[in-house]
Image (cartoon, rainbow, N blue to C red):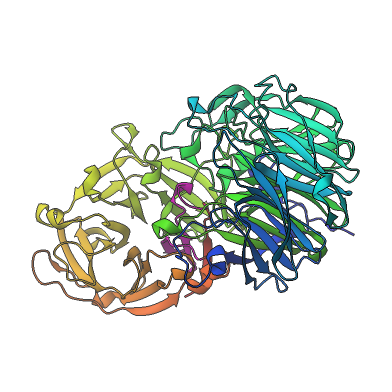
Amino acid sequence: MHHRFAVGSLAAILLSGTAFSASAAEYFDRIASFPIIANLPKDADPKGATVAEIISASEDGKLLVYTDSPRKAIGFIDIANPAQPMPGGLVNVGGEPTSVKVIGSRAFVAVNTSESYTNPSGKLVLVDLADKKISGECKLPGQPDSISSKAGVLAIAIENERDEKVNDGALPQMPAGMLVLGALNGDKFECASLKTVDVTGLATIAREDPEPEFVDVSDDGKVVLSLQENNHIVIVDGRSGKIETHFSAGSVDLKNIDTKKDGKIDLSGSMKDVPREPDAVHWLDANRFVTANEGDWKGGSRGFTIFNKDGSVAYESGPSLEHEIVSIGHYPDKRNKKGVEIEGLEVAEFGKDRLIFVGSERGSVVAVYRDTGAAPEPLQILPTGSGPEGLLAIPSRNLFVATSETGFQAEGGVAPHVMIYERAERAAPAYPTIRSVKNAAGLPMGWGALSGLAADRTQAGKLYAITDSFYEGAPRILTIDATKKPALIMAETFVTRNGAVAEKLDLEGIATASDGGFWLASEGNLEKGVKNLLIKVDAKGTIQEEINVSASLEQGAKNYGFEGVTVTGLGASETIWLAVQREWADDGKGFVKLLAYTPATKSWGAVRYPLDKTENGWIGLSEITAVGDRFIVIERDNQIAEKAKVKKLYVIAAADMKPAPLGGELPVVKKTELRDLLPDLKAAKGYVLDKVEGFTVDAAGDAYFVTDNDGVDNSSGETQFIKLGKL
């Protein structure tokens, strides 16, 4: 029997009509995250290209097999204990693997061996799981892109993809793609059973050049094939190879979407007749299938569609999923033409529930829906690491797995990960930790890049955050209700100057002022001509005063300036303290300033703070918060995942904070470690996020911190908002 939890009236009001809400008692939570570089040979360059793209699993669900195109290999992950995945090594397959499907005791790997776009080639490689050795190969008539199998039918989509650099990627670009079918007896397979199905002449777009993208086989051996750039779908009998039906994937009209790359998330845009251009496609039952409408060429419909077998539309998501992604801070503003790019799909039955998993390539999440036979019921959204591509359900073990195609290890960032989730009865899902409610227009407030926190002076659980320069077109103060789980962004206040949204600000710190307004810290950037500023705004966000540091100090200022701000005292004794992130020209190595500004006398002073040492990257301050008789700072390195070593809260006694005038010798304060935040960050079971940037203590004495997701730019978009309680 499936128990259901009622949605509280407030939540029902706050969340959108298709919102992911607490309507089911069983949820997936992430239980492990496996870095792909753990599978590399010891002598391999850890910064070298490596990905996990498409993934499959052994029949017992204890061994994962994924494609790693840059390494020309398939990789193995032992998940006998899914909470502790172990490396299983790589097997070279002699080309770029594009897809993999485990059938019985063997992995069937589609491999691209093309020497060029105009001379494509490929092969099917069979790898025995027991000894991880190649046991057979079959030549394919072109470049494969997807492989699927069920009911004794093997299906391979031969894409022969277009060169996007030729004529702006316009079609046709020959040779044409096709569908290849094969017959299976268990996992026994003969190359001679392979046959080609011609799918030219079907689509209205580039009829002579179909570009098959994704293929799926139903329980009764029917094959559904997406021709992405051709915006077409073909259904074939997998045994005879007869084309049973085909039809256009159609288009959608989109309203309430962001269409401009202008540094703000503005859901007032629209687009008409947008081709769906489906990528992944998956059968739901014998009569329906679902498509992920990535729109890789001219499309970008930002959603997914459930089709009936006859081509009629049973359900269209429109921008509803994208709105949910906006509300949890995962919207990629720099990708507005195509939005969140829905790309991956999985369908599986867990108990009595048929679940649909929908992956957003650019939003770096997977949404989970329950199939109802009509409009699917949204259940939850899972964080996946950057660029989820391969989605895999393992119902026999109550597991779901998502791969990460995108990695930033070459730039010193995080490598691709495979993330593992387990379904169980829970009061609520662990993610998201924070989300926005709907605004006055009935749309979710866009947010991301939370870079500072402050607490309301009287109301427990009421917090304020600010967004940094990633949203340069929309600097905002966000009001948060932290008494809810997830925490709710309830309101947004734009920071304005002379009646217009303020420009050239990089807001990194916020503190509440005694008059109901706020003090803001804006970080300088010498390359962009942006100064370090202490800013006073009223409760409506109107700038009342902008305060520069002295000219002599500004000359020594480097990037990595003001990062946090806090306030002590009242009236004539009021002091504004600012944390400088890293050393400036007049600082000794390993020391940074804590600047003090006295509004009554308009004077500056400072103390020096000693930084920890780090073996990799740099280390600096991200926040400063005055709490009673002590100051609490965030000190962190700029490292991510397994390289992260320092994410800490340190305490300085208020009595030690005696600023000296600038230009002379500054006293060095003593710090005491209060809390190592690494265990808190690791508790999310993903990789450790690098930017711990906001911290505050509310009116009831409860502490909170938040990470900055960089506006989902070269980032997974994940935000961890964590309540620490009393410290």
Q: Answer with left or right where residue 172 lies relative to residue 473.
A: right
The reply to whether the magenta stretch includes residue 117 is no
State the residue in front, 604 or 240: 240
The reply to whether the magenta stretch includes residue 690 is yes
In the rendering, at what x and y percent does residue 276 appear?
66, 29
Which residues lie in the magenta part? 688-716
In the rendering, at what x and y percent does residue 364 appear?
57, 49
State the residue in front, 369 or 418: 418
Quarter of the rendering containing residue 40? bottom right
In the rendering, at what x and y percent does residue 423 appear?
75, 62
Quarter of the rendering containing residue 430? bottom right
Is residue 399 at least partly visible in the picture? yes
In the rendering, at what x and y percent does residue 718 appear?
53, 55
Q: Residue at x 41, y 65 (%)?
A: 639
State the residue in front, 493 or 425: 425
Q: Residue at x 31, y 61 (%)?
A: 567
